[in-house]
Image (cartoon, helix red, strand yellow):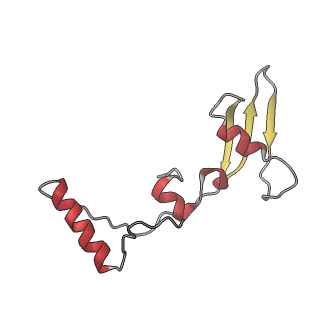
Amino acid sequence: MFHEAAGQFSTLYGNIEDMLLGCEVVVPGGACWRLPASVRSSVGPDLKSIFLGSEGTLGVFTELTFRIHPLPEHRRGQSFRLPDLRAGIEILRHVMRAVGVRRLRGSTTR
């Protein structure tokens, strides 16, 4: 099973552009560009990320090489059913107080 590295999963696996090692892209006009797996560096624009962020407007991926991570042996999730939104807000307030999170009233600091 493959999980896209976004949202909750990006904390563990990194962003999708960090997982993309190499690719082959067909650009308008039909030319095929192979962007090999390489180490990140600061020698110029990262063409893989540019193509990835263009959402298909600059070219079409025909081959992708990703860094993969093994799935954990066990996963655990929890869910709660509450009677209404007000009850959910009250529980969140209780949890926030329990862990020491305080709301700063009138603060303009960032």
Write down the quadrant of residue 105 in the picture: bottom left
Q: Nearer the viewer, residue 62 or 89?
A: 89
- Extreme front residue here? 106
Residue 5, horizontal then vertical, whole percent: 54, 53
Q: Nearer the viewer, residue 75 or 43?
A: 43
Q: Is residue 46 visible?
A: yes
Left or right of 60: which side holds 96?
left
Residue in view at x 46 percent, y 52 percent? 1
Left or right of 83: which side holds 96?
right
Residue in view at x 36 percent, y 70 percent? 103
- Extreme right residue here? 43
- Extreme left residue here? 83
Vertically, is 78 above or below 101? above
Residue 71, horizontal then vertical, whole percent: 48, 63
Left or right of 71: which side holds 89?
left
Q: Quadrant of the C terminus?
A: bottom right
Q: Nearer the viewer, residue 74 or 80?
A: 80
Q: Is residue 69 visible?
A: no
Residue 37, horizontal then vertical, whole percent: 77, 52
- Total labels drawn: 0
Q: Nearer the viewer, residue 88 or 76?
A: 88
Residue in view at x 41 percent, y 66 percent? 106
Residue 97, horizontal then vertical, whole percent: 29, 76
Write down the quadrant of residue 59 in the picture: top right
Write down the quadrant of residue 14 in the picture: bottom right
